[in-house]
């Protein structure tokens, strides 16, 4: 157990360069993870808006005259 | 409808490729990250800071690759006026900006312990900073016009102007003396980079590339959907206009 702990702390110390190595990886995760998140949420928003606009108001309004039941 | 023929094909094709590409990126990062952080040995000169390389070098490669792609798309857009090229260019510019930023920031974090400074105004670092500004300029310009086609055209011209910067980025370390090590990675071993370091580097580079490709597809799809929404709304407005027109004289 003590051996494991010292292995882990040695790993985290990065040979004295922890202050440079870890921020690099954290930054990579933030930048690339943020880009992935932004890309996915923008894609979801765009496809949802397009889907909502495609059937919608216009199509319903056109149909209103012919069959009143269809609007419910 | 003919102008959507190619975007349509792109949507079906990318829909089929995307799950595989995203899965590939996840798997490559799942292998590459532990390899880079734990398995790969420290460098005999640079110690553990060599682990910064696995983030820094692929980011720099992708920064340049992405710009070459942006320039090719811009040329295609200006020559053939193809909408899909505009969409793709608009989609990948922010990805390239992120990779360039990551290359610059991780380079600073590597430069401080190894060179004793975060930054030097030498040709390599300065030309990459300029590359970053070209990306920002492209992003700003492509969104600066109400008519997206005009924005795309202006941004495409900017992207092509920025191509002169690419060879400077690539060969600056050979042309001018610099703190930055030369492009040949032979510095790590006698004939070539040692496989213990080269293999995780290549896996990380492949992971970055898969991530880039997946994001490029997702963002291009987003641009297609946005354009369709714009067209949909415009045609709706156009359809309403003639209705309002003739009804007025009838009522007067």
Image (cartoon, grey):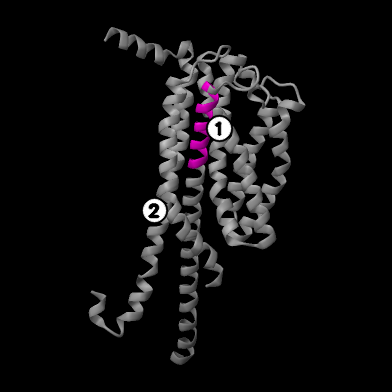
User: Dot 1 corresponds to which residue?
Assistant: B58
In the rendered image, is residue B7 in sight? yes
Question: What's the residue at 55%, 32% (across, down)?
Answer: B58
Front residue of this view, candidates B32 and B173: B32
Q: Quadrant of residue B85?
A: bottom right
Q: Quadrant of residue B152?
A: bottom right
Q: Residues within 10 Å of mark 2 (few under 14, many from 20)?
A: some
On whether residue B203 falls in the magenta region, the answer is: yes
Question: What's the residue at 45%, 73% (across, down)?
Answer: B236
Which chain is mark 2 on? Answer: A
> Residue B218's x, y, as percent?
46, 51
> Residue B82's x, y, as percent?
61, 62
Front residue of this view, candidates B236 and B116: B116
On whether residue A43 falls in the magenta region, the answer is: no
Query: Magenta: predominant secondary structure element?
Result: helix
> Residue B109's x, y, as percent?
54, 22
| Residue A44, disc | 2
| Residue B125, disc | none
Front residue of this view, candidates B139 and B245: B139
| Circle 2: element type | helix
Residues in magenta? B196-211
| CB under 8 Å between discs 1 and 2 | no
Question: What's the residue at 32%, 80% (across, down)?
Answer: A63
| C-alpha span from label 1 to label 2 | 28 Å
């Amino acid at each position: 157990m003590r051996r494991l702990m010292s292995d882990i702390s040695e790993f985290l110390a990065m040979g004295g360069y922890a202050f440079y190595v870890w921020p690099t990886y954290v930054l990579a995760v933030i930048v690339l993870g943020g880009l992935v998140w932004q890309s996915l949420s923008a894609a979801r928003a765009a496809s949802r808006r397009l889907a909502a606009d495609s059937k919608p108001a216009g199509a319903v309004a056109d149909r209103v005259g012919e069959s009143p039941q269809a609007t419910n | 409808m003919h102008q959507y023929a190619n975007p349509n094909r792109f949507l079906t094709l990318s829909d089929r490729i995307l799950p595989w590409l995203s899965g590939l990126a996840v798997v490559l990062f799942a292998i590459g990250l532990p390899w880079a952080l734990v398995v790969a040995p420290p460098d005999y000169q640079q110690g553990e800071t060599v682990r910064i390389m696995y983030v820094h070098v692929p980011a720099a490669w992708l920064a340049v690759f992405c710009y070459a792609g942006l320039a090719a798309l811009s040329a295609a857009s200006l020559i053939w006026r193809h909408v899909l090229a505009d969409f793709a260019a608009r989609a990948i510019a922010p990805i390239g900006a992120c990779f360039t930023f990551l290359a610059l920031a991780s380079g600073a974090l590597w430069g401080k312990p190894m060179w004793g400074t975060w930054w030097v105004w030498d040709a390599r670092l300065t030309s990459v900073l300029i590359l970053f500004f070209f990306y920002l300029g492209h992003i700003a310009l492509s969104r600066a016009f109400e008519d997206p086609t005009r924005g795309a055209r202006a941004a495409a011209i900017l992207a092509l102007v920025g191509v002169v910067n690419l060879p400077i980025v690539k060969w600056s370390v050979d042309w001018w003396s610099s703190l930055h090590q030369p492009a040949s990675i032979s510095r790590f071993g006698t004939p070539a980079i040692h496989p213990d370091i080269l293999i995780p580097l290549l896996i990380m580079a492949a992971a970055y590339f898969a991530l880039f490709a997946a994001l490029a597809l997702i963002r291009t799809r987003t641009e297609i959907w946005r354009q369709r929404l714009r067209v949909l709304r415009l045609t709706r407005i156009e359809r309403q206009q003639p209705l309002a027109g003739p009804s007025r004289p009838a009522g007067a």
